[in-house]
Amino acid sequence: MDISVVVPLYNEAESLPELTEWIRQVMNKNNFTYEIILVDDGSDDDSWKVIERLKADHAEIVGIKFRRNYGKSAALNVGFEAVQGEVVITMDADLQDSPDEIPELYRRIREEDFDLVSGWKQKRYDPLTKTIPTKFFNSVTRSMSGIKNLHDFNCGLKAYRRDVVKSIEVYGEMHRYIPVIAKWAGFKKIGEQVVEHRARKYGTTKFGFSRFINGFLDLLSIFFVGKFAKRPMHFFGALGVTSFFTGTLIALWIIGEKLYHIANHIRYTREVTDQPLFYIALVAIVVGFQLFLTGFIAELVSRNAPERNSYQIEKTV
């Protein structure tokens, strides 16, 4: 099979018939073999009834329904588990992504050997309350991830080699950072393609302001897990040792200063324990010790995790 199209959706009953028909026209025009995987993320409208009707008429449609709303990341992860196509396309169900982009995305994966090609909605039809925070987080993500060539990490329209989606796990609200997750998994050939962004035709957006806070926290999680999941002591231990020795040096300095004054019969106006710096040193020593113990415990947990020796193997001959 050439292409699997994964469409996560929540309350998009009105747009599904038009979207699937548009995808079918593009696929048939280009003679692709394909499947359309519609993942209903616990919709409370008629989305699932629409999917059942579409499935009855078109064998290439696959429907998956969640019992409740879990979020876009969960829908994508389940869709990725089900795909069979050599190239996987993800797109939103609200008709703001154009299926006409699929042939070029497919070509770049197959002919230019990209692992992942992410869409860039250069011209957007979103309000400023959405576009300004999005630009900020894209900038932060570029800096933290080292993926300098992407302008829009959160674009729903992306293309992947099947190996990529079968090798990564998407959870929480980490769907917006899939390129970062793919990079940490070893898939480093990541490209970008300018795509059309269309104004929403039906319904309203499902995302609120909280997604920006959650998104930033997820970015920190990805950064930490990607770099230190298999060696947490390198993170906590380094911080702990730094804090412990900094506090120790400050304490020794204060004590040494007092001994110097005593040895030279110089009046010493304040006791060691009367100095704020002494308590700063004490806190640094305690915090450093706790961080070191945290790293030690995290190392034990990591070593006993079932996936502690799970590595991505690209080829075997």
Image: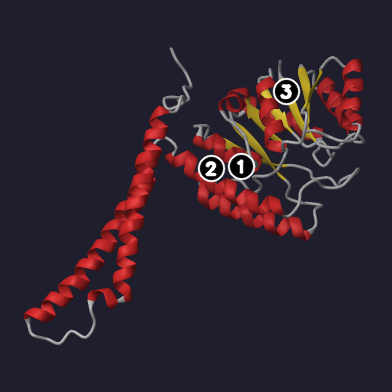
Name the residue beneath numbered marker 1. Answer: 177
Q: Amino acid at mark 3?
A: Ser
Q: Residue furthest top?
A: 317
Tell me which residue sits at (41%, 25%) in the image: 309
Above or below for 17 versus 249? above
From the viewer's side, name the closer residue of 128 and 242: 242
Contact (Cβ within 8 Å) of mark 2 with mark 3: no
Please tell me whether mark 2 or mark 1 is closer to you in this view: 2
Disc 3: CA contacts within 10 A as few (<14), some (14-19) or many (>=20): many
Name the residue beneath numbered marker 3. Answer: 4
Q: Amino acid at mark 2?
A: Ile
Indicate how the structure is coloured in the image: secondary structure
Q: Quadrant of the N terminus?
A: top right
Q: Which mark is residue 222?
A: 2
Above or below for 256 versus 214? below
Nearer-N-terminus badge (2/1)? 1
Q: Residue 274: in sight, yes or no?
A: yes
Residue 238's spot in the image, x, y percent? 33, 50
Residue 21's spot in the image, x, y percent? 89, 27
Above or below for 249 versus 239? below
Q: Quadrant of the C terminus?
A: top left
Q: Residue 148: in sight, yes or no?
A: no
In the structure shown, which secondary structural element does the residue marked by tag 2 occupy?
Answer: helix
Residue 305's spot in the image, x, y percent? 44, 28
In the structure shown, which secondary structural element does the residue marked by tag 1 occupy?
Answer: helix
Cα distance in 3D space between marks 2 and 3: 26 Å
Tell me which residue sits at (61%, 46%) in the image: 150
Tell me which residue sits at (92%, 17%) in the image: 57
Please tell me whether mark 2 or mark 3 is closer to you in this view: 2
The answer to whether 104 appears left or right of 93 in the picture is: left
Q: Amino acid at mark 1?
A: Tyr
Please tell me whether mark 1 or mark 3 is closer to you in this view: 1
